[in-house]
Amino acid sequence: MLQAGHSLARVLDTPGAIQQELQSRQSRKIRRTYKKIDCRKTWLFKGGLFFFAWALLIVFLCITISTMGYQIVGLQKDIEKLQASNQRIEYEIAQKSSLDRIELLATKDLGMVKAEEDLNFAVVIPSERRGETAVKQDSVNVANRDQEKALKKIYDNLIRLAARSN
């Protein structure tokens, strides 16, 4: 027989067996079982999970804050080094721009001669309007004005230097 390998071929030998087999294949009822879940356990699990996430967040924030603290300390040290360097440079500038040093360089390196203090000048100014010549022999006033201008320049430079140091 050709149907020997088929599963119904074995059952065909008994009367009414074919109908029972067909009915059992068509209408099988599947029963499902459901587990009853305890709400307290789920809330406890969710609460524990939330607490764990919260603790991880707090740890992360603490680590971030501490690393930023170390960075701040490092930046403060850098600022102190730069301020010390700036003060050193300002001192060198003040040293090199001092009037005594400039006078020394002018007399030695450039070959300039220091002016005598009691030297008097006579200046003849022609006056074309009146046709007269005026002789001005007020060397004391001229020397005083020059000294006042030099002192004013020194005073202004000292004020600028004091303003920069603050």
Image (cartoon, rainbow, N blue to C red):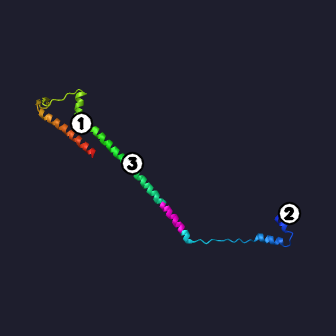
Q: CA distance from mark 2 to mark 3?
A: 90 Å
Residue 143 at what x, y percent from top left?
14, 34
Asked whether residue 52 is drawn in magenta, I would say yes
In front here: 7 or 128?
Answer: 7
Mark 2 or 3, closer to the camera: 3
Q: Is residue 126 left or right of residue 83?
A: left
Q: Which residues are magenta?
A: 44-55
Residue type marked 2 = Ala
Instruction: Determine the residue positioned at 53% across, 68% down.
Output: 44
Residue 42 at what x, y percent from top left?
55, 69
In front here: 78 or 150?
Answer: 78
Mark 2 or 1, closer to the camera: 2
Residue type marked 1 = Ser
Q: What is the secondary structure assignment of the residue under circle 2?
A: helix
Instruction: Determine the residue positioned at 42% across, 54% down.
Output: 66
Mark number displayed over residue 75: none
Q: CA distance from mark 2 to mark 1?
A: 123 Å
**The N terminus lies in which quarter of the figure?**
bottom right
Q: What is the secondary structure assignment of the residue under circle 1?
A: loop
Q: Which residue is mark 2?
A: 4
Residue 17 at what x, y percent from top left?
83, 71
Is most of the magenta stretch helix, strand or loop? helix
Q: Which residue is mark 1?
A: 98
Q: Earlier in the sequence, mark 2 or mark 1?
A: 2
6, above or below 164, in the image:
below
Q: Are marks 1 and 3 in contact (CB under 8 Å)?
A: no
Residue 29 at what x, y percent from top left?
72, 72
Residue type marked 3 = Gly
Instruction: Determine the residue positioned at 30% across, 42% down.
Output: 87
Mark number displayed over residue 74: 3
